[in-house]
Image: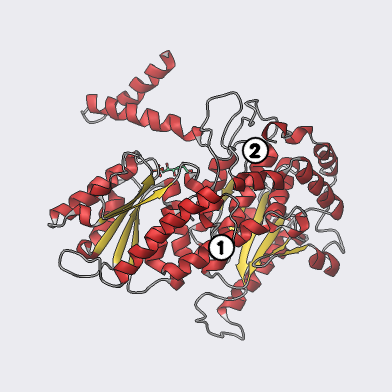
Amino acid sequence: MSEERKSITECEAFAKLRELAKTPIDLTASGVLSPERVQSFCCHGDVFDLLYSCQRVTNEVLDVLQELSDECLLVEQFQEMRQGAVLNRIQNFPSENRQVLHTACRDLFSEKSACEFAANQAQVELDKLKVFLAELEQGKIRNEKGESFHTLIHVGIGGSDLGPRSIYEALRAYADTKRTIHFISNVDPDDSAQVLAEADLSRSLVLIVSKSGTTLETLANESIVRKALTDVGLDPNKHCLSVTGESSPMDNPDRYLRSFYMYDYIGGRYSSTSMVGAVMLGFGIGYENLLAFLEGANSLDNAAGEKDIRKNAALLSALLGVWNHTFLGMSTVAVLPYSQALHRFPAHLQQCDMESNGKSVQRNGEALQIKSGPIVWGEPGTNGQHAFYQLLHQGTEDVAVEFIGFRESQRGKDLIIQKSSSQQKLVANLLAQSMALAIGKDDANPNKRFPGNRANSILLAEKLTPHVMGALLALYEAKIVFQGFCWNINSFDQEGVQLGKKLATELLEAMGKNKEKGSLADAFLNVAEMHSQS
Ligand code: G6Q
């Protein structure tokens, strides 16, 4: 099927949507936000409800979005991906040419997996991790003095940091309070220095995570941490663990207390449910919670196979995004979780979405004729309300908003103050913002006028548990993948990050040759000159 895919602009639904986008529904018009609309524009899933009455769509638009989904074979491609199709490629040009099988890492809970070989490989690694965690628990693995390890320092960057870190932050309420997790990602020496100043190295495991085993930042940080261990008389090989690709330069079990694999069919930014996230999460929140997280992700992957867009939250969310971005021209999406635990989740989505869909070439190698991925950003509410919501309500930029909320708090520690709990205040604020963006407010004073008609939706679940976090992660992964299929781009490579890396290496060399103070500008000019001549 791969070569039969239509570009979105060739779809009949594309022209229809263009036409419909000339007169989108006005959410501020009287009676539009009716009880019927609020009730029927709700996609109920096992974990999430997607409330989308405040999106600028009608049933007619939804019907054509369904046609678009069918014409672009979005669900068929998603299923092909899960079964191991080589989707990470650009036709007729050299490319990574790989399968895309992050979903296999969690396809471990039914009799038959969509891709048996990849699920088997995931199971082998998970079993290794289970044994390792049990040995730590039983005191079979200890430090030189016979003490237990109570700290883990996770060293990695990009996909080997952002997803795992945001998930750990999200699930800290479930963490073993006797254990501590630190992260080092930046090559900025202050990042490692800060962590090394705080951690008790003798009781620390250091997890080096790099799929390629060649990433400059991670290798530099590994060396810094190894030296710090050696400096206090510890043997780094007895404290360091690794997660890397098979036969990468880091695939050397002699240098690590334990080594785990991730495979080249899992992209870095999609790797949180592989060993990249699992080792640290297993240590921090325990094996059972890790399994619940994986199961949540798997349940969402299964739900994403539903073709009816009104019954598939990931697909609907993707298509609402395409409607807002491609047809209504909104160039940016704010993801606003009303949950402090999700404070790093927008940062993960920034990478997952923008590195996946920030492309301008189609899968057939031709230039894209429409805009691809939007700019994604966000912060938790209510904090964001006291920061950038001014622009959302009254600015000249039309920002699509995706709220995420939970009926219950994670920890259940709350207090009734002025007749409401803090959780109720949080949820009331979420609903208020959604409504204010949609309906606006007229005023004789132009400076106090709220134009409204600002598209937004709410993803609502009961409580942020490990299972729900897994489902949330997988929902966004599926959303991003569906949008990439729709725009006919390869969402799985990242050529756009290569040039800067290459120039940094050249600049380092040039800086080495010009050691005197003030020579940074010279180094910059030397390298720029080399390239403008080439
Ligand atoms: C993600 C990207 C990128 C990658 C980092 C770290 O999809 O490929 O962010 O995860 O560059 O790479 P390594 O895991 O190979 O160190």
- Dot 2 amino acid type: Ser
- From this view, report whether residue 289 is shown above or below residue 52: below
The image position of residue 123, as x and y in percent, is 46, 57
Crowd around label 2: few <14 · some 14–19 · many ≥20 (10 Å) = many
Q: What element carries label 2?
A: loop
Residue 109 numbered tag:
1
User: N-terminal of the two: label 2 or label 1?
Assistant: 1
The image position of residue 459, as x and y in percent, is 66, 63
- Dot 1 amino acid type: Phe
In-image side of 267 versus 149 (left or right): right
Along the line of sight, the residue nearer the viewer: 227 or 273: 273
- From this view, report whether residue 134 is shown above or below residue 475: below
The residue depicted at 34 percent of the width and 38 percent of the height is 214
The image position of residue 237, as x and y in percent, is 21, 52
The residue depicted at 30 percent of the width and 43 percent of the height is 219
Along the line of sight, the residue nearer the viewer: 71 or 20: 71
The residue depicted at 33 percent of the width and 20 percent of the height is 526
Q: In which quarter of the image is residue 434?
A: bottom right
* Colouring method of the image: secondary structure
Residue bearing mark 2: 372
